[in-house]
Image (tube, grey):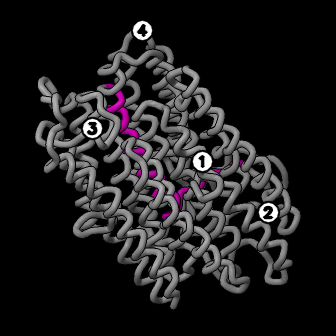
């Protein structure tokens, strides 16, 4: 594939971006055509995931060297185009989405077949289309392109949330769409129009300091637009627009993993932080005092969601509220407006993804192998499913922020960033949330390995889930450890972003 250097030595115009975008789209088409041949259908999903990852991987080295890939598709209006771009910020999310799609493709095969789920072809097709939307978001060069693919993700994941086609599934899917579409139309569209009117452009600059607003921009209007950004991308799970997320847990576990680790919520926090840093910029956020107050606001989400998680006996529900809490770490770090704070927030996009997909994979494996959904029913189950619960324990340590797992890197960077900002209140939020994380994760692991089996529950015949499920969850947990011991891969990308 040829690339042509243009627009200066640091910009590479390349159709590689378009190919990466089309791989999951074309893969979804092949999957839909192979519905009567399950092995072929799954093979297309896995092949598409691997090809996408390899294409994305080839762009890492140039991006780390300071290059930016660029490809314009359409010009709509002056200053409004559909354009793709891969920079260091893009690569963080693109690498996560493409690599975890591989793990999810293998895992879904074992889960869906193990439970003899219906409509597996539709499931795999929509799964690929959701990745198509996520890659489009990752590679968006401007706010218009970002908004377009953000909406594509919403539409393509609706059938996944409603997969079981019962009353509970339709209710969860309805809530999902109502929250996401009303916030997008009510906040994002007005925000985008006003930004275009004020600046004449929707293009993201190439640094996080300046943003696209003029220095004499009306502070009140900019502050309003900033609030629209925070609430408009409701996939980020910030309270009070978080209720869709626990409701979406009616979906099959691979969908929950997709929602929480690969695509949907990561799309939300990626879009939120992309707009904060590349539309508003750190200089303007600092001058208008938008950073620390927002950090306190999302700090409330961090603490309250953790408190609610403590009350949930259903494992997926507890993990859902954990996600609501953990997502706000990313926004909080960016809003500290300090180098270490921003780095901690952005690297948590990756660290949270690998740990959270492991936790949901474990929840699904427990359900397939033992048909248990509630934590109170899992006492002693770790002795029967040691690999699953060991992986769960590793991922839980990452969520808590304990060394040597990846989440420790996040907490370390955020704590340093908090000290740099001189905000004692944020420091207390981080410490309190860590204790709460221990409070709702430790009992799960303790019950599994040290709890007494319930009376009349011999666990006879229960064993580990199929290898197609067990291997992905173990691999993801191991990657969490590797990212904790050797954090430089994603940290180097983050450092390119922060300069």
Q: From the image, tell me which residue sits under label 1.
A: 243
Disc nearest the viewer among 3 and 2: 3
Which comes sooner in the sequence, label 1 or label 2?
2
Rendered image: mark on residue 254: none
Q: Disc 2 to disc 4, how far (Cα)?
A: 48 Å
Q: Are marks 2 and 4 in contact (CB under 8 Å)?
A: no
Mark 3 to mark 1 CA distance (whole Å): 26 Å
Residue annotated with mark 4: 36
- Image quarter for residue 435? bottom left
Which SS type dominates the magenta stretch? helix
User: How far is the residue under mark 1 from the one under mark 4?
Assistant: 37 Å
- Residue 24 image offset from top left, x and y in percent: 49, 34
Q: Is mark 4 on a helix, strand or loop?
A: loop
Q: What is the magenta range?
A: 82-109
Find residue 414 and report its horizontal and vertical position in percent. Answer: 43, 76
Q: Which residue lies under the disc numbered 2?
A: 201
């Amino acid at each position: 594939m040829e690339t042509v250097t243009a627009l200066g030595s640091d910009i590479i115009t390349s159709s590689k971006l378009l190919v990466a975008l089309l791989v999951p789209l074309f893969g979804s088409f092949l999957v839909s055509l192979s519905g009567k041949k399950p092995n072929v259908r799954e093979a297309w999903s896995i092949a598409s995931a691997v090809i996408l990852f390899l294409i994305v991987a080839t762009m890492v080295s140039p991006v780390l060297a300071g290059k930016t890939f660029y490809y314009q598709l359409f010009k709509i209006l002056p200053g409004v185009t559909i354009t793709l771009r891969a920079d260091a910020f893009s690569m963080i999310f693109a690498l996560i989405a493409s690599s975890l799609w591989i793990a999810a493709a293998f895992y879904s095969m074992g889960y869906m077949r193990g439970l003899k789920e219906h409509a597996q072809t539709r499931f795999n097709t929509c799964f690929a289309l959701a990745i198509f939307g996520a890659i489009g978001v990752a590679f968006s060069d401007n706010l218009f392109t970002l908004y377009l693919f953000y909406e594509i993700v919403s539409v393509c994941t609706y059938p996944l949330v409603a997969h079981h086609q019962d009353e509970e599934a339709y209710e969860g899917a309805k809530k999902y769409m109502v929250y996401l579409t009303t916030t997008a139309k009510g906040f994002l569209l007005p925000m985008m129009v006003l930004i275009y009117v004020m600046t004449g452009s929707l293009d993201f600059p190439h640094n996080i300091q300046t943003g696209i607003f003029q220095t004499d921009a009306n502070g009140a209007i900019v502050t309003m637009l900033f609030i629209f950004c925070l609430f408009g991308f409701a996939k980020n799970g910030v309270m009070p627009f978080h209720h869709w997320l626990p409701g979406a847990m009616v979906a099959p576990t691979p969908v929950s993993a997709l929602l929480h680790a690969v695509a949907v919520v990561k799309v939300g926090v990626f879009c939120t932080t992309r707009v904060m840093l590349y539309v508003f910029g750190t200089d303007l956020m600092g001058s208008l005092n938008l950073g620390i107050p927002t950090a306190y606001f999302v700090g409330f989400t961090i603490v309250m969601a953790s408190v609610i998680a403590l009350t949930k006996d259903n494992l997926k529900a507890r993990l859902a509220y954990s996600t609501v809490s953990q997502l706000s770490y990313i926004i909080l770090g960016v809003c500290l407006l300090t180098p270490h704070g921003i780095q901690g927030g952005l690297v948590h996009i990756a660290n949270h993804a690998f740990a959270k997909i492991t936790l949901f994979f474990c929840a699904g494996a427990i359900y397939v192998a033992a048909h248990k959904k509630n934590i109170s029913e899992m006492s002693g189950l770790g002795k029967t499913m040691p690999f699953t619960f060991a992986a769960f324990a590793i991922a839980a340590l990452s969520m808590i922020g304990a060394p040597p797992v990846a989440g420790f890197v996040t907490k370390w960077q955020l704590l340093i960033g908090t000290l740099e900002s001189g905000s004692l209140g944020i420091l207390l939020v981080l410490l309190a949330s860590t204790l709460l994380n221990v409070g709702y994760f430790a009992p799960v692991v303790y019950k599994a390995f040290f709890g007494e089996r319930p009376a009349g529950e011999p666990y006879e015949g229960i064993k580990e889930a199929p290898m197609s499920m067990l291997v992905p969850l173990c691999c993801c947990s191991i990657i969490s450890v590797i990212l904790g011991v050797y954090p430089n891969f994603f940290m180097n990308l983050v450092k390119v972003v922060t300069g």
